[in-house]
Amino acid sequence: MKIGASTERMTDEAGIAVEDRPRSTDLSGAAVEVRVPASAGNLGAGFDCFGLALQLYLTVRVTIEPQSLQPCRMRSRGEGYGTALSPTADNLILRAMALAAEKQGLTLPPICIDAENEIPLGSGLGSSAAAIIAGISLSAALCDREISNDLVLRHATELEGHSDNVAASLLGGFVVACTGDDGSVIAVKKYWPRDIKVIVVSPHATLETVRARAALSPLVSHADAVHNVQRAALFTAALEEHRYDLLWEATRDRLHQERRESLVPGLADALATPRRPGLLGLALSGAGPSILALAQDHFDELGMVIAQCFHKHGIETTVRLLDVDDSGRQIKRV
């Protein structure tokens, strides 16, 4: 779906056609800015359930341009420049803004979007979730409407297809999410210890979520399902009881990682990294191909060891040491 000029004659809540409504100079230059963190989904056994917000951000400022003849102008910087953040691409920020406005029966004014993105695209770090949360939040703010977190999550999950990343990007911290049969989303923010850092090793190879999900089996065995349920429960218990020695076992997975590890050379070796000093847990970040390591020390050494798994296949990497973002989406008028 591409967002462009609409050929439909839109009306506001009073039934006045937008193009017939007197333009107010008071709106000119009015702007809203939102900052949304990256996120890592799954964390091993918590498939489509666990999300962790990370201190890497998408920042989007939207300015109302009431005199513009274009529905949207866009500028972008950083990761994804000229691709997913361009005005002619299948742009998730615009799609999310349009969906939220449609759901609320609102009409967006002509706007200019200025996006600065630190989140690499197609790397399993929630770039699409951040764009969706940003778009929904901006749409409501521009139209001067309050929108509950429950409704944001419902709309965002409808676009994203799963709730773990969008919940973490919205709420911040470590989030456990569940999608109901009616499409509603339950999300609970849990404790995350400040002394556990996140090492993210991103190979310079993108992996589209659609392709990564296509690699999964539609059916799983009873034994594999039980294995993951046990370890997902163990993960939250280990954090709550400060039993960080249990996180290694708690991040073991049988539902998705093994089926995805062949999609990028080096993934299998990275996921098979043996336990080392400072390394608490290891998992694929979301659908990949980034590898996420939970650690308390030896950060540089651990990053180099994991990165080498890709280097020996001729694939360069970016290694990031990140803290967990505890604030989630931040929005302000500027």
Image: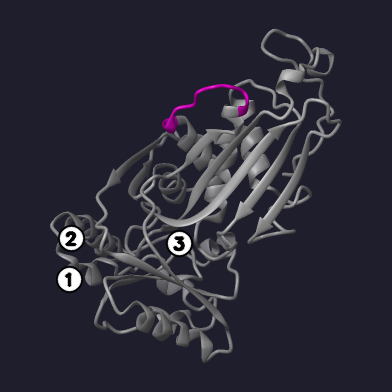
Q: Residue at x 45, y 35 (%)?
A: 183
Q: Residue at x 76, y 10 (%)?
A: 16
Q: CA distance from mark 2 to mark 1?
A: 8 Å
Tell me if I can see residue 272 in this picture. no
Start-end of magenta stretch: 142-150
Q: Is residue 262 above or below residue 27?
A: below
> Badge 2: how crowded within 10 Å, few (<14), some, or many (20+)?
some
Q: Which residue is mark 1?
A: 245
- View extreme (bottom): residue: 312
CB within 8 Å, label 2 to label 1: yes
Q: Which mark is nearer the camera, 1 or 3? A: 1
Image-based side of 216 in relation to 224, left or right? right
What kind of secondary structure does the magenta stretch mostly adopt? loop
> Badge 1: how crowded within 10 Å, few (<14), some, or many (20+)?
few
Q: Which residue is mark 2?
A: 238
For the residue pair 87 and 299, the one nearer the viewer reads as: 299
Amino acid under label 3?
Gly
CB within 8 Å, label 1 to label 3: no
Residue 22 is tagged as none
Amino acid under label 2?
Ala
Amino acid under label 1?
Asp
Q: Is residue 120 above or below residue 93?
A: below
Residue 286 is tagged as 3
For the residue pair 332 and 124, the one nearer the viewer reads as: 332
For the residue pair 261 and 25, the one nearer the viewer reads as: 25
SS at mark 3 in the image: loop
Q: Residue at x 24, y 62 (%)?
A: 231
